[in-house]
Image (tube, grey):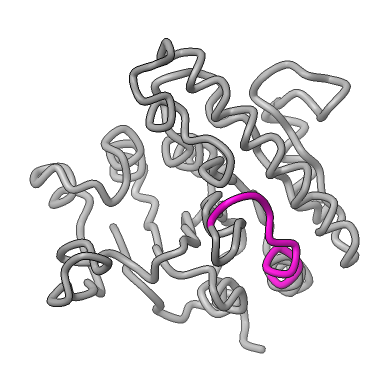
Amino acid sequence: MGRPAYKRVILKLSGEALGGESGRGLDFNMMKKAALAIKACADMGVEMGLVTGGGNYWRGAKDGGGKMERSRADLMGMLATVMNSLALCEVLEQVGVSARVMTMLDMPRVAEPYSYGRAMRHLRLGRVVLFAAGSGNPYFSTDSAAALKAAEIGAEALLMAKSIDGVYTADPKTDPTAQRLDHIGYGEILSKDLKVIDAAATSLLRDNAIPTMIFALDPPENIVRVVCGERLGTLVD
């Protein structure tokens, strides 16, 4: 095992990746492997904040399909991230990781309400903090929530583990000529209106000079490799 390249990071796990091959529900085998990789990083002294998507259950307005009021559909998406965070926290604790779920929506019987000071204390004590319920507001994706938390806690990088292994010139599922990019700038994403990371998150990350690495969660050991500075997937800065 190498030496960590970062002291503090935000790891964003897509909901679809937590669902394994089907992309739906929870694949506990995949989650345990991810938890062991997260433990390896924490054992090296890396302070880890986690943000999960909710697409394995509900993708907010995308799944609402115009049949639901946007704010309510997005609220359902936030609740999906809470379920994912609770499940992942359980798996982390099973492999010996001290973890806390903090929510941006008030639900004290479910998890701790988020506060900056308490979150930083957890991180300094070596606990993995799972930031759930997105940003707590509709019209913002979990990409934006991850970018916001990365800026707020002073993360040195945002690591985005997805069901795809990086950014491509086109959709590799439909275009066999699509090529993976090793690097792309935030400015190019914004100027070309690329859907790599949503625009709000892209602007926030650019303005705070936080690099993002987009890589595949499968195999979960990729998390350790990226934390140790290996270039996998696509670097965005």
- Residue at 55% x, 66% y: name it: 21
Query: Can you give x and y, in whole percent of width and height, for residue 62 in the image?
Result: 38, 32
| Quadrant assignment for the C terminus | bottom left
* Residue 32 belongs to magenta span: yes
Specify the quadrant of the image occupied by residue 152. Answer: top right
Q: Is residue 210 magenta?
A: no
Percent x, y of residue 162:
46, 61
Image height of 25 relative to 58, above or below: below
Q: Quadrant of residue 69?
A: top left
Please state the total of marks drawn on the protein image. 0
Query: Where does residue 59 sit, x and y in percent of width and height?
Result: 47, 35
In this image, 143 relative to 225: left or right?
left
In depth, the one of 227 and 219 nearer the eye is 219
Instruction: Note whether 192 is above or below 204 in the view shown.
Output: below
Position of residue 212 in the picture relative to residue 198 (left or right): right
Q: Residue at x 22, y 72 (%)?
A: 181
**Most distant residue in the bottom direction:** 1
Which of 173/212 is in front?
A: 173
Q: Name the residue: 16% across, 48% down.
A: 187
Q: Is residue 46 left or right of residue 77?
A: right
**Where, quadrant-wise, is the N terminus in this rendering?**
bottom right
Q: Position of residue 149 (x, y in %)?
A: 54, 38
**Rendered view: 26 above or below 178:** above
**Residue at position x 52%, y 53% from top?**
16
Q: Which residue lies furthest to the left in this view?
A: 192
The boundaries of the magenta stretch are 23-33
Which quarter of the figure has residue 112? top right
Q: Left or right: where does residue 41 sit relative to residue 171? A: right
